[in-house]
Amino acid sequence: MNKLTALAVALCAVVGCTAPAMAAQSVLSHGAVCNGTNDDTAAIQGAINVAGATGDYVDFPSGQTCKTTSTLYIGDGSNTAQSSQNGVILRGFDGRNSMNWGGYATKPVNIYFSGALAAIEVRGPLQGWGVQGISIACANVPWSYGLHVVSASFGDTRNISIRDCSVGIYSEVRTAIPAGMANVDSLHNRYQNVNIIVRNAISEATYGILETGNVLAPANTAFSDYKNVNLGFIGVDYEPGAGRTTYGLYIQAADTNHYENFHIFGISGGLGGGSGGANPDKFFGVVLDYTVNPDWPNANTFDHFDLGKPPSGYLVLNYGTPSAGDSKPNWWTHAGMANGAKYPILANLLPDHASGTWTPRLFGTSGGSATYSKQVGSYEMNGYEVTARFHIVTSAMSGMAGTMMIDGFPITSTMHTDEDGTCVLATMTGVTLTGGHTALTGLVTAGQGGATLIKTGSAVAYANAAPTNFAGAVELRGYCTYKREGHR
């Protein structure tokens, strides 16, 4: 370090130094009036275009509403070319205070969008964009988006509010890869402190957040982070019997995204309930849609979700069937399930905790049936460990053949052959053991939906239990412990 640099560092330590501020383009300086009635679209777009050339911020006035009638574009990318403009950060000061649980329509709005499609569209491929401290309101126009992100990366969006759009945030990708690029994913975007209010007053389906990609490029929405998000829904039964569908978080072609601290809730209007009729409204909290590409969504994490159980519709569900080989599991952890709602148990979705009931049965691997007077089962899953309890009472059996099993597990066991589970029989009547076998236990092997019943003895080798070991009237009570699939 030379003497001049050392002197500068010492001086900064005494008086304090700040980095030079990034320049900002005020929309008012570019001719926007922001009185709520004047069309400010052209003036705001002019400010964005200047900022796109210089890398500046674009500032919106506090407490004033700028009306737009067509989409505001950040960037000018397309299917054939990267954006020639830099990423731009739109910056306001009302987004953090624009909505709360009450006073829905009384808070200030920075952008009131009365047109169709997107209020703001990020036209990638580009990176380094953001929307911060901005409040956006649409006019309940079908397929209007608050924020439309197309093949954009490394975005920093925070302290925003979006209301009355049919889609709050819509992330997707280009359908072709421009020359000189490896992919067109929308990836590594951050969304923090986001409040989206959807009023289902239109005839189309509505979405809080919609993420997708395509199979043509292929590309998807990936490696993005959503944190501290409210998704509120007003008047889902606004017109009872209209058959409208509302989705909270809807994910199609997306992988390795992180969704944390989500609160999906209804404000009024009987969330999802409708008022009956032949075609009631439906509400879905989180949807994993595998119909675009069966490999996606995969490897996404859902952490700290609060889902209240709606009177009509579903909390979490799959559309389509995940690929058996290439779709990596999604993870569901630390959820607050209100009103008696249960953790979701779905294909390719692994929760960290679940409990419920199941129906155990005695099963011959080569056929047969039983008449039951009792089939009671309960289970708990904590992390990777599953404990499945059972109580089976039969009055008769017919045609049992092969190896005897307890079947019907609520969660499939791990596919790893070196991590077998075991069963303990606390009550056992109607079972006859011979040939030195003195006890009956169970073995849960790779990928099973049940346990193979095993005869054991201190002086003989173990053997599979056969139908001849069981009378027609049998009682078995006990539990099995094993690891679930997806734990590695």
Image (cartoon, rainbow, N blue to C red):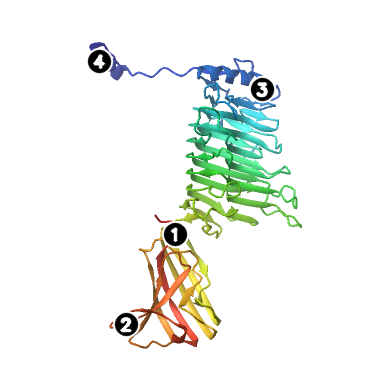
Counting from the top left corner in percent of width and height, residue 389 is at 45, 72
Rounded to the nearest angstrom, the CA distance separating label 3 from label 1 is 53 Å
Q: Which mark is residue 41?
A: 3
Q: Is residue 87 visible?
A: yes
Read off the residue under disc 2. Answer: 457
- State which mark lies toward you, 2 or 3: 2
Mark 3 or 1, nearer chain start: 3
Q: Amino acid at mark 2?
A: Gly
**Circle 3 residues within 10 Å: few <14, some 14–19, many ≥20:** many
Rounded to the nearest angstrom, the CA distance separating label 2 from label 4 is 82 Å
**Could you tell me if the residues under marks 3 and 1 are in contact, i.e. CB atoms within 8 Å?**
no
- Position of 39 with respect to 399 (left or right) is right
Rounded to the nearest angstrom, the CA distance separating label 2 from label 3 is 83 Å
Q: Is residue 103 visible?
A: no
Of residue 394 and residue 329, the one placed in the foreground of this image is 329
Read off the residue under disc 4. Answer: 6
Q: Give the quadrant of the N terminus.
A: top left
Of residue 443 and residue 69, the one placed in the foreground of this image is 443
Rounded to the nearest angstrom, the CA distance separating label 2 from label 1 is 31 Å
Rounded to the nearest angstrom, the CA distance separating label 4 from label 1 is 59 Å
Task: Determine whether 52 is above or below 120 in the image.
Answer: above
Q: Residue furthest top?
A: 4
Mark 2 or 4, nearer chain start: 4
**Could you tell me if the residues under marks 4 and 3 are in contact, i.e. CB atoms within 8 Å?**
no
Q: Amino acid at mark 3?
A: Thr
**Could you tell me if the residues under marks 2 and 3 are in contact, i.e. CB atoms within 8 Å?**
no
